[in-house]
Amino acid sequence: MHTKREAYVAVRFRTLTESALDAELEGYIADSFGEDIKAVTYHEAEVKRNVEGTWATTIIFDV
């Protein structure tokens, strides 16, 4: 996001397996970002399939 100054609002996964990922991102050019992310932590992070059958993730950012 910072390299291309883009913000992404949607993703469409074409392929998502244990060893491959192909997706289409939808977004816009960002004028600026409020704060920089210093790091992503794995503490309390999770990826799970919800009752509707879609995937959800929780990611914690250190700002």
Image: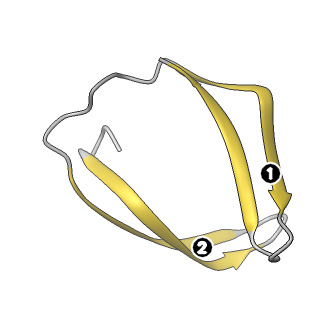
The image position of residue 28, as x and y in percent, is 23, 60
Figure quadrant of the N terminus:
top left
Q: Secondary structure at mark 1?
A: strand
Callout 2–callout 1 Cβ contact below 8 Å: no
**Residue 28 higher or lower than 6, as above or below:** below
Q: Is residue 45 left or right of residue 1?
A: right
The colour scheme applied to this rendered structure is secondary structure
What residue appears at the point 39 percent right and 61 percent down from the top-left corner?
A: 9
What residue appears at the point 19 percent right and 46 percent down from the top-left corner?
A: 30
**Residue 62 higher or lower than 28, as above or below:** above
The image position of residue 40, as x and y in percent, is 61, 27
Q: Quadrant of residue 17?
A: bottom right
Q: Is residue 19 left or right of residue 12?
A: right
Q: Is residue 3 left or right of residue 59?
A: left
Q: Earlier in the sequence, mark 2 or mark 1?
A: 2
What residue appears at the point 80 percent right and 76 percent down from the top-left corner?
A: 52
Front residue of this view, candidates 24 and 47: 47
Front residue of this view, candidates 31 and 1: 31
The image position of residue 42, as x and y in percent, is 76, 28
The image position of residue 24, as x and y in percent, is 47, 74
Q: Secondary structure at mark 2?
A: strand
Q: Amino acid at mark 1?
A: Val
Q: Which residue is mark 2?
A: 22
Q: Quadrant of residue 14?
A: bottom right
Q: Residues within 10 Å of mark 1 (few under 14, many from 20)?
A: few
Q: Which residue is mark 1?
A: 47
> What label sits on residue 56 in the rendered view?
none
